[in-house]
Amino acid sequence: MTSANTENKGYFGQFGGSFVPEALQEVLDILEENFLKEKDNSEFIEEFKYYLKEYVGRENPLTLAKNLTKQLGGAKIYLKREDLNHTGAHKINNAIGQILLAKRMGAKRIIAETGAGQHGVATATACAMFDMECVIYMGKVDMERQALNVFRMELLGAKVIPVEKGQGRLKDAVDEALNDLVQNYKNTFYLLGSAVGPHPYPTMVKHFQSIISEESKTQILEKEGKLPTAVIAATGGGSNAIGAFAHYLEEPDVRLIGVEPAEAPSLSEGVPAVIHGFKCYTLLDDNGEPKPTYSIAAGLDYPGVGPEHSFLKESGRAQYVTVTGQEALDAFVLLSKTEGIIPALESSHAVAYAVKLAKELSKNDIIIVNLSGRGDKDVEQVFNMLK
C-alpha cells in the first residue's frame, strides 16, 4: 500500500514524482539505478550496519519516561533515543547511508541543505570520516539562530554557504542546493536530508531512516510483549517521522501520528502542489507560490512535506496534528525537568502532543515518541526566549 512505484518515478498515490529539468533527470535516474542495486547488496548492507554500530552508536535505547508517565497518570510513554546518536540526532543514519552510496558511485564532492543545522553537521561529519569535499547551503536566518551548528560544520571541514534570497530559510537552501546540482552533477552528489525532493530521494531517505522503527518495534515487543498504541513523531520535511513509522505501516492497530508546528502546518492546511521537484501538500500564498513559514524549530520550517506523508494523510493511515511553538517550548522544559533529557525543539513538538494524548489513554496503553534529536543546539535560543 505504501511503497513507491519506481516504474512510475516514485509516486505514493498522487504524490511524489520527479518534476525536474532533463539534465537533472538523467542524474536522478543514475542515482536510482545505483540505489536499487546497492540497497540489497549484502556487502553494502554489512558496511552500512558496521558504521551504524561502530560510528553512530546504534542500537540506541527505547527509554521508559517513568517520571513523566507517572506525572500524567495515563499511557506509558517510551522515548526512542535518536538524541543519543553521534552528532545528536537521527540525521546521521541517512548521511552515512547516502555517503556510502556516493563513495561507490565515485563522487568526490558532497553538497547538502540544512535548516536546524543537524543534517549539515551529520553530512559534514560523514564527509570528514570519508575524506570528501563538503558544501552546505543554509538560510541566513537559520545560520543566525543556529550559529553553534554552523561553527560545528566548519570545524568538521565543511564550507557553509549563506543563502540570503527569499526568506533565508530551509526552502531557500534547498533551492540553492538543487541549482548547484544542476550545474555540477558530473562530480557532485546531493546528500538530501529529508524525505522530500524528486524521486528517488524520499524512498532512499526512508530506507536509511527505517532503522528507527526496525529497532523500536523489536525493543517494545521485548519490553512489553505487545505493539504500541501509538507512535508519535515531529513532522517537518518528514524524515524522522517516516523512519519512526516505516515498520508499523502494515500494523493497522498502531496509530501513527505526525506532529506539525501550528505555524507551518503543511499537511493540516496545505493543498497538493509541486515544490522542489515533487508533489506534496504545500502551503501556498495568494499567488500560488510556496508560503513563507516560521517555526521556533528551524528543522520544521518548511512549506511542504514528504510525499509519503501526504499519501498517508490522504489514505487515512496516519493522522497529522499541530501544536503551537509555546506548547513545544513547555514540553522542552517539562521533559528536561522530569526526565533529565533536554529534547530538540523539533522533538519537543512530538513530546507536547504525547503529553496531551497520554492523559486521554489508559495505563494499559503505550506511546512511543521518536526523540529525533537533543536540545543542545537550542539551549541558547530557548534561554533568550524564556528571558
Image: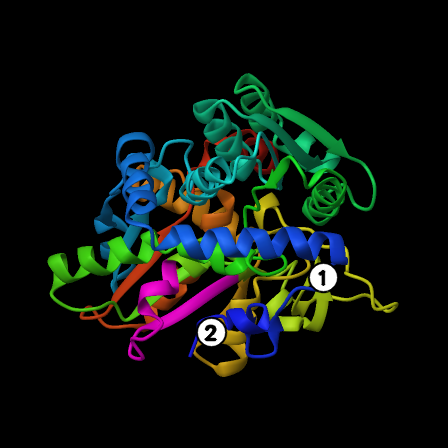
Q: Is residue 58 above or below residue 54?
A: below
Q: Given the image, on which type of amino acid does mark 1 rest? A: Ile
Q: Which mark is residue 275?
A: 1
Helix, strand or loop status at disc 1? strand
In this image, 22 relative to 219: left or right? Answer: right
| Quarter placement of the C terminus | top right
Q: Residue at x 63, y 59 (%)?
A: 198
Query: Residue 282, percent across and down?
Result: 69, 67
Question: Any magenta on residue 16?
Answer: no
Residue at point 31%, 79% (across, down): 252
The quadrant in which residue 51 appears is: top left
Instruction: Find the residue positioned furthest to the right.
Output: 287
Q: Examine the rendering and report whether any part of residue 47 can be seen.
A: yes
Give the vertical position of 350 relative to 174 (above or below).
below
Give, as a three-letter code, the residue at label 2: Gln
x, y percent for residue 64: 22, 51
Structural distance between the alpha carbons of marks 1 and 2: 22 Å
**Residue 241 quadrant:** bottom left
Question: Does residue 257 belong to the magenta stretch?
Answer: yes
Query: x, y percentage for residue 211?
Result: 32, 52
Image x and y of residue 274, in percent = 72, 67
The residue wearing badge 2 is 319
Q: Is residue 372 above or below residue 282?
A: above
Residue nearest the observer in this picture, 191 or 221: 191
Q: Which residues are magenta?
A: 244-259
Instruction: Tell me: 177 left or right of 318.
Output: right
Q: Residues within 10 Å of mark 2 (few under 14, many from 20)?
A: some
Circle 2: element type: strand
Q: Is label 1 or label 2 in front?
A: 1
